Image (cartoon, rainbow, N blue to C red):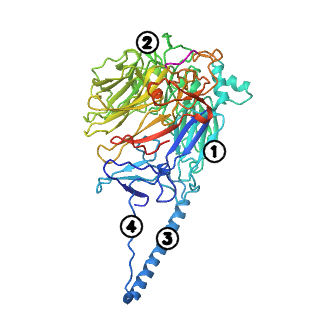
């Protein structure tokens, strides 16, 4: 089929990454996104980092020499072939022109990484050793054909936002939507934490909202398509579940710091609504929104959002305020119901909620409580119980918008709170549950299981049949802000997981260790070390070949021989051997905060960033291995920025980096 092409791979060879253009021989787009010293950099990463594709099939041509005796026959055959080619070319041009004029059809594709990608791996039943990469469909000729690889720097901006890929300008090429903020606005927002965002905008003589931005960047050349203001720094973006203005196109709902919550039209950046924060704590964070049934029957799903993370609290202060779950109208952003659901036992919430759907369509919401120093639990509540609680209606009353065939009679063996309907899935001991669980059928009984990652270094697999524990894996002395990623990484038929854990205790870490753990019992299959702390969750690429899944993980400082010194830090973090704070630098939990964003990693969003100016030092392998250099030389900071790179790794040859720094 056109646009479908393959790479033939030897056993356990590297899978080439590719870059997209309108040429049928070109390949899929891989975007890199990093922040360094207050500058945002978006980069179209070239295929193979400039190297030729690995094991690409060679095209061999056989030259036919016609017999002079049959020259007349040869000429007739040649003329017929040329005529057929010309007719086919004319037909293709007419078809292309037709599709160019047909601009009302949506371009749909399915992603293998998550719902926001367009990199598809399709089955090839006849050739078990071929992996096929399908290009996203385009409408005729691309209006802005991709030329050279591009890089865009945005001076004085910082970002801790996720990235979403959407065809904003309808040219058949995915564009980039992400959040960013001017460094001065980030600092001002932290220093004036208890001044409302509206008041800060007035003091700056600007319209509200003003402290953050949402950008759309054209995928072909990096040009800004539109920019719109947001209440504060954007961290999460959902462009999958809501058509707010009911125009047939999905809209985006963005959330982040300072209770940011607003709906945006991704085609033009127009703000569709600002979320009602009457029931929110304005200095707390908002997390990724979740789509609920259309309770008010207006044609738009309702919005569930968690509000939590008190920046005023010190790590050792355990008297916290309860995090909140709020339901809002998807069409207007107004509060739905009359109250929010508070986390029990005065526990904070740092987790985006996750939907668990049973075979009969019953829906349950999973969310976690607790934090880096506060114990918490993984909890569950059914959609009807949440509806009855926020509307203060009888549990016997009908819930609009839910599937009438759903029984909601699962897990009768678990105790449910009489007032709220909450069910405790996993109870934490010393620390909380801060990252979304993985929902996948691990034991192959036809029912999705739940893999929960606690901040205390514990991973627990919960059986979806009865919510009992299948196994638990422990990583003592380690913590993680990342969710595990599933894949088939050994020779059995059970899903395994890649996860990384940071050595130390918040906010002080020395390094990060990546693990492949066996889905059967939680044992460790493989361990890989990263010399510096990492926060980004790992990604998995599922292939059509058995036990040949791949994983992507991020490494800072690889090959750069650079480490933080005792007076420097990452965004919200410290080294374990860090020296005393300079007198002129504010403490991480000071109410006035800090006015520096950091160098690109997402800090724990419940607290203001803790960033300290400092020198960067270079040291040898021995110092690198132990984390404290014996000899070092101070270098110019600008010339010695730690490198940031992505690695695509096959389990069997994890040292072969397809993209390296």
| Image quarter (top left, top right, bottom left or bottom right) of the N terminus | bottom left
Question: In this picture, is 187 found above or below 154?
Answer: above
Query: How many angstroms separate mark 4 from mark 1 (CA)?
Result: 43 Å
Tag shown at residue 345: 2
* Image spot of residue 195 (x, y percent): 66, 19
Q: Disc 3 to disc 4, how far (Cα)?
A: 24 Å
Residue 499 within the segment the image draws in magenta? no
Label 1 and label 3: CA atoms lie apart by: 35 Å
Q: If you read the primary sequence from the N terminus, does the residue marked by circle 4 or circle 1 appear first?
A: 4
* Residue bearing mark 1: 224
Q: How many angstroms separate mark 2 from mark 1 (CA)?
A: 46 Å
Residue 361 visible here: no
**Disc number at residue 89?**
3
Q: Nearer the viewer, mark 2 or mark 1?
A: 1
Give the secondary structure at mark 3.
helix
Secondary structure at numbered mark 4: loop
Magenta stretch in the rendered image: 576-580
Q: Judge depth for marks 4 and 2 and give the one in front.
A: 4
Q: Is residue 174 above or below residue 203?
A: below
Residue drawn at x 34%, y 29% is 450
């Amino acid at each position: 089929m056109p646009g479908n092409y393959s790479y033939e791979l030897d056993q356990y060879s590297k899978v080439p990454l590719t870059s997209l253009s309108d040429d049928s021989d070109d390949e899929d787009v891989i975007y890199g996104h990093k922040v360094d010293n207050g500058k945002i950099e978006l980069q179209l990463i070239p295929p193979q980092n400039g190297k030729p594709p690995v094991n690409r099939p060679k095209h061999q041509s056989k030259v036919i020499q016609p017999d002079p005796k049959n020259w007349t026959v040869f000429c007739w055959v040649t003329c017929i072939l040329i005529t057929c080619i010309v007719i086919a070319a004319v037909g293709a041009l007419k078809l292309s022109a037709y599709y160019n004029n047909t601009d009302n059809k949506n371009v749909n594709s399915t992603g293998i990484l998550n719902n926001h990608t367009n990199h598809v791996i399709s089955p090839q039943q006849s050739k078990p050793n071929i992996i096929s990469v399908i290009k996203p469909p385009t409408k005729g000729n691309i209006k802005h054909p991709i030329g050279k690889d591009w890089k865009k720097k945005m001076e004085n901006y910082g970002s801790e936002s996720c990235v979403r890929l959407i065809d904003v300008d309808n040219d058949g090429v995915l564009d980039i939507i992400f959040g960013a903020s001017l460094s001065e606005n980030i600092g001002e927002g932290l220093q004036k934490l208890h001044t409302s965002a509206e008041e800060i905008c007035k003091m700056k003589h600007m319209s509200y909202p003003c402290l953050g931005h949402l950008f759309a960047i054209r995928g072909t050349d990096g040009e800004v398509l539109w920019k719109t203001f947001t209440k504060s720094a954007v961290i999460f973006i959902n462009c999958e579940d809501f058509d707010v203005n009911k125009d047939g196109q999905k809209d985006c709902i963005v959330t982040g710091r300072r209770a940011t919550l607003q709906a945006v039209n991704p085609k033009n950046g127009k703000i569709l609504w600002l979320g009602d924060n009457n029931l929110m704590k304005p200095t707390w964070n908002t997390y990724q929104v979740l789509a609920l049934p259309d309770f008010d029957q207006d044609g738009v799903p309702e919005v569930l959002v968690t509000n939590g993370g008190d920046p005023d609290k010190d790590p050792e202060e355990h008297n916290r305020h309860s995090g909140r779950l709020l339901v809002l109208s998807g069409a207007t952003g107004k509060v739905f119901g009359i109250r929010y659901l508070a986390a029990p036992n005065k526990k904070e919430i740092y987790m985006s909620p996750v939907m668990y759907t049973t075979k009969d369509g019953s829906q349950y919401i999973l969310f976690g409580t607790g934090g880096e120093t506060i114990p918490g639990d993984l909890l569950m509540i059914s959609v009807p119980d949440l509806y009855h609680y926020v509307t203060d209606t009888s549990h016997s009353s009908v819930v609009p918008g839910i599937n009438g065939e759903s029984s909601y009679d699962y897990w009768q063996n678990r105790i449910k709170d009489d007032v709220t309907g909450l069910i405790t899935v996993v109870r934490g001991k010393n620390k909380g549950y801060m990252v979304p669980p993985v929902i996948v059928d691990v034991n192959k009984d036809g029912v999705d299981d739940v893999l929960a990652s606690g901040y205390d270094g514990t991973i627990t697999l919960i059986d979806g049949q009865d919510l009992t524990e299948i196994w638990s894996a422990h990583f003592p002395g380690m913590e993680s802000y990342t969710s595990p990623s599933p894949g088939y990484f050994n020779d059995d038929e059970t899903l395994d997981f890649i996860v990384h854990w940071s050595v130390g205790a918040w906010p002080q870490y020395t390094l990060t260790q990546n693990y492949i753990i066996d889905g059967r019992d939680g044992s460790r299959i493989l361990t890989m070390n990263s010399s510096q702390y990492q926060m980004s969750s790992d990604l998995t690429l599922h292939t059509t070949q058995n036990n040949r899944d791949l994983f992507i993980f991020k490494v800072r400082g690889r090959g750069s021989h650079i480490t933080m010194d005792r007076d420097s830090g990452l965004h919200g973090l410290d080294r374990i051997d860090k020296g005393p704070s300079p007198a002129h630098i504010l403490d991480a939990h000071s109410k006035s905060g800090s006015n520096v964003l950091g160098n690109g990693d997402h800090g724990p969003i419940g607290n203001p960033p803790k960033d300290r100016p400092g020198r960067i030092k270079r040291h040898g392998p021995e110092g690198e291995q132990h984390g404290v250099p014996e000899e070092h030389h101070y270098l110019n900071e600008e010339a010695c920025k730690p490198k940031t790179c992505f690695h695509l790794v096959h389990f069997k040859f994890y040292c072969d980096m397809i993209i390296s720094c």
